[in-house]
Amino acid sequence: MSADAQAPRAYWAIFVLPLAVYLLAFLVAPFVNIIVLSFHTYSPTRIWTHELTLANYADLIDASFAMVLLRTLRLGLVCTAICVLFGYPLAYFLARAERRVALIGLFFLIMPLMVSAVIRTFGWLVLLGRNGLVNNVISSFGLDRLPLLYNETAVVIGLTNVFVPFMVLPLMASIERISPALEEAARNLGASWFATFRRVILPLSLPGLISGCLLVYSAAISALVVPMLMGGARVRVIGRQIYDQLLISYQWPNASAIATLLVFATTCFAFLVLARLRHSARQEPRA
Amino acid sequence: MALTPSGQDVGSIPELEVRNLLKRFTARSVVGPLSFAVFAGEFVSLLGPSGCGKTTTLRCIAGFETPTEGSILLTGRPIEGEPPNRRNVGLVFQNYALFPHLSIFENVAFGLRLRRVGDAELRRRVGRVLELVGLPDLAQRYPGQLSGGQQQRIAIARCIVLEPRILLLDEPLSNLDLKLRLSMRRELRELQRRLGKTAVYVTHDQGEALALSDRIVVMSNGRIEQIGSPQEIYERPANAFVADFIGSSNLLDAVVVGVESDATIIRTDRGLTLRANSTAHAASDRVVAMVRPERIRLAEAGPTPADGENRLAARIKEATYLGQDLHLSLGIDSGEELAAVTQGSAAPRLAVGRPVMIAVDAADIFLLRK
């Protein structure tokens, strides 16, 4: 290979190196530490000892933990589904809107992300509480007040609100790349509006849809603040479990095992989905 | 029985009729009102510079734009209220618009699957049109693996497999390189003739329109300037715009100074007096005189001019050698400048600066309304 072809590779390293070092020091190293810790024995006096064990993982085979795990995954799925439902039409609209409208829409879309999670969540508490705005309106019609807080519904409302942008942004990028002429071609060939969506728009926006789902799902199952404040004690999720084990019970090895399991599960899921996506991309080369 | 130039009975119902079509985008941007008819088996081009409304007209016919006023009739039946998927008019896009996620087979089968055509018949029909466009072996490929010309043929195959009433083509050759464009042009015309399919073709390329069409609708600024066969449009342009847009022509602003029984005498604004075989104008009318460059002959410096011939003394100001042709720019003594075309082999005799005598037949000077 010529020197010319080698040159870009050296530059490439310079661009990537700072972030790589940062991630190595502050993400990979602590995470390796967590994995290592998860195989050590808990000690009530010294937190952990050098004795190696699998007990922390064995402890996870437990009905109450299984409940927490299932609830977390279920919340993640429901939240992802709702984000798709709300996010897809919005992403389509923004992708096809004229630039000015799209920019205003994007601003409103990411506005929730500019407010701190705690403040935003307290806003929801004011709205959804027993004497909150929503229930006051409901009761003014003579109806019974609804339990809108401290249950899974509340957590789903809170999470969806924050994560919709994570669904919309990759979807929008994906839909923008689909030429409107393809939609017109489908219509011209006899496709109804729905058939055009199902046979052309949806398959071509699949990469964006999958990225969006991955982002929302992994963010939803690792959420902590929203489930804690809006779900209360009854809606215990994995994030809360790790938090309690770590900071309240000082069960560091056990918390590490849960964290390792969570990361492992999320990573496997993402890899499977992305591998499937690459596979289909190979089958359908683009011009 | 009256016939259109392409041999259609005028009394029969046109395959497609556009009646007083008007599309208003903004107060200043309006297409129409325009009316024209396309008869069965005819190949009609909408020709004009970009922004003249030809694509808007096509999109109204396909159903992607809603006309503000007027109607569009397909064999006598108004379709302007129908959604695009119910119109059964095939549209071939400028960028082909093949579905990148579907194989060539599935691209062509797209419309058939929507119509729930059975598997055996679907295979037969897709196979037949792929054969027809000369690409039977590419069924399993994907659009990204095809060349521009191949994609173009698949786009056409995808339309004609549905046997639409008419075929609409939106600048289908403009993304191809010159050589391919010329061969695709011939192929397209041959295919359209063989299928007997009525076609409306949008283009800004006058060469394409002249080569392909039975009739041409020349448009500018949202209006129709002239409708006619390629020969009519080229040889008898209705006005100065058409004369200028189709082919190259010398256009001279002039005033009618004399009317004879078989000819009109005009004087150009620079004082050149010419004789034209036209009787449609009265004295002191403002006209535009048009002369095609290939109708300007280099005359032998001889004695008397032939009957009905204009003779002018000129000097060669510029000569561009293009192989077969030699393009000349001639300065007339009165100050006019005329473009002329002659055979390339004459180049050695026609050096820049040489004085020449030119002859233009009175029959080759057309007087157009301004």
Image (cartoon, coloured by chain):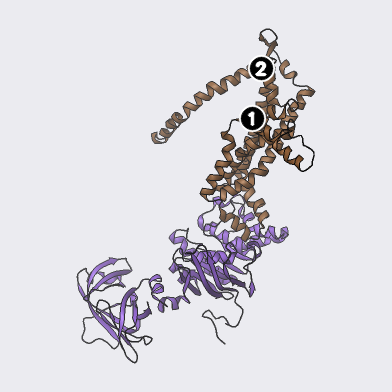
Chain colours: A brown, B purple
Which image quadrant is residue A254 in?
A: top right
Which image quadrant is residue B166 in?
A: bottom right
Q: Earlier in the sequence, mark 1 or mark 2?
A: 2
Count up the numbered dots: 2
Q: Is residue B84 left or right of residue B249?
A: right
The residue type indicated by label 1 comes to Thr
| Badges 1 and 2, same chain | yes
List the residue tagged with mark 2: A247
The residue type indicated by label 2 comes to Leu
Residue at 61 percent across and 30 percent down: it is A119
Disc 1 on helix, strand or loop? helix
A274 relative to B76, above or below: above
Residue at 48 percent across and 64 percent down: it is B29
Quarter of the picture containing the N terminus of chain B is: bottom right
Label 2 Cα crowd, 10 Å radius (few <14 / some 14-19 / many 20+): few
Label 1 Cα crowd, 10 Å radius (few <14 / some 14-19 / many 20+): few
B292 relative to A91, above or below: below
User: Who is closer to the viewer here, B68 or B21?
Assistant: B68
- Residue A174 at x, y percent in the picture: 58, 45
- Residue A133 at x, y percent in the picture: 70, 37
Could you tell me if residue B134 is visible in this image?
Answer: no
Residue at 58 percent across and 44 percent down: it is A172
The subunit letter for the residue under badge 2 reads: A
Residue at 34 percent across and 77 percent down: it is B290
Q: Is residue A149 left or right of residue B268?
A: right
The disc placed on residue B212 is none
Which image quadrant is residue A251 in?
A: top right
Choose mark 1 or mark 2, whichever is in front. 2
Could you tell me if residue B335 is visible in this image?
Answer: yes
- Residue B102 at x, y percent in the picture: 62, 51
The disc placed on residue A267 is 1
User: Who is closer to the viewer here, B103 or B369?
Assistant: B369
